[in-house]
Amino acid sequence: MPHVMKNRFSIVALVAAASFAFAGCKAPESGSSATVGKPQPVVQPSVGLQERFGDEIVVAGHFYRIGTPVVTWMDPGGYDAYRVERRFEPYEESGWEATTQAMGAGKVKWESKNQQFSPMRYSMRYGSPQAATQRFTPRELEQVRGGGWPLPLLQKTIDQFVLHYDVAGTSRNCFDVLHDGRGLSVQFMLDLDGTIYQTLDVKERAWQATISNNRSIGIEIANIGSYGINSTQAPLEQWYKKDAEGKTYIAIPDRLGGLSSQRTNPSVLRPARNDAVVEEIQGVKQRMYDLTPQQYAALIKLTAALCDVFPKIRPDYPRDASGKLINHALSEKEWEQYQGVMGHYHVQKNKSDPGSAFQWDLVIDGARAELAARRGSPLAKK
Ligand SMILES: [Zn+2]
């Protein structure tokens, strides 16, 4: 989603991130097959600490284990959209007061659409005075205005899961652009190595998809994006290179930390398909490299979990009468009625994410299979 890239990079958060290990991803010790595939607690529970496994998302204060690594805003190395300071500025210049002074002096350009110098990058679902009084009983409003959503009320409220690519390339750069630069937010980010970052409880109304913000959860998937075949291909040429064997790999620029920007320190990252994929979106043929296999695996787990905990989000994508993927924005009426997984381009005519290479069937079929396994049913189709 963001269109701006910045150049700053600090090793501090990466060191912190690397220290947060998800035991399920560690290579098993030789000869100890008993530990294979069994996530171990992040901290050995003692003195009454709640066990954490590093694969939990947070839903109205509840932890839900999704079976793939998640770094929440509360964890070392996480990205916290509740904080008002700028995450990547020099520490002494990062506070809200220092930031507003710098804005007043014209030294900081705040790119929020609202143009309001507000410390808030998120808000309450259906939180405008008119919407809130229509939507909630006085008792419900009294509960949610304090941030404390009852899960059943949240389950009635959320019915869309909106997928974005970030055009920032890495989750770290995405948070820099959204939080420090544009005054925006998103509940989840999905990095190239498959790490999911949760920046806000899903109860919050993140600012990610305009008219869908009240009713949706959003995810920014790390990918440099899709480009009209007649426009510049420079970002694709910069981010995707071929090795001696002709296999495509992702060349994360040094200014963004290269491969060390990824929590799991991978030795190489490749798109799921070797060549760029051309498909039409919003009536324009677009070219894009696919997500990584690690991203698909993680996205399937998260999609299944969200469809499980929010029954109104159907594990499906917008289809036409013949069952084919709709490759443009929905009409107002279609959008109103749609409940399920969708792209940002289904919400807005001026968007193309999650892009021409995105494999909808892979994600939806995978999520349905995962849901069926979780629910112990052979189907769980809809
Ligand atoms: Zn977007």
Image (cartoon, helix red, strand yellow):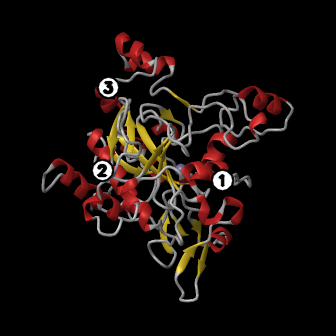
Q: Residues within 10 Å of mark 3 (few under 14, many from 20)?
A: some
Q: Is residue 117 visible?
A: yes
User: Which residue type does callout 2 highlight?
Assistant: Ala
The residue under the point 70% across, 65% down is 254
Residue beneath label 3, please? 153
Q: Position of residue 78 (x, y in %)?
A: 54, 44
Residue beneath label 1, please? 3
Q: Position of residue 329 (x, y in %)?
A: 46, 52
User: Which residue type does callout 3 highlight?
Assistant: Leu
Q: Secondary structure at mark 2?
A: helix
Q: Is residue 339 visible?
A: no
Q: Are marks 3 and 2 in contact (CB under 8 Å)?
A: no
Q: Position of residue 248 (x, y in %)?
A: 54, 79
Residue 197 located left or right of residue 150: right
Q: Is mark 3 within 8 Å of ligand 1?
A: no
Q: Sequence-wise, which precedes: disc 3 or disc 1?
A: 1
> Height in image: 177 above or below 130?
below
The alpha-carbon separation of the residues under discs 3 and 2 comes to 20 Å
Q: Nearer the viewer, residue 257 or 38?
A: 38
Residue 103 located left or right of residue 318: right
User: Which residue type does callout 1 highlight?
Assistant: His
Q: Position of residue 162 (x, y in %)?
A: 43, 47
Q: Sequence-wise, which precedes: disc 1 or disc 2?
A: 1
Residue 313 located left or right of residue 257: left
Q: Is mark 1 within 8 Å of ligand 1?
A: no
Residue beneath label 2, please? 304
Q: Nearer the viewer, residue 330 or 4?
A: 4
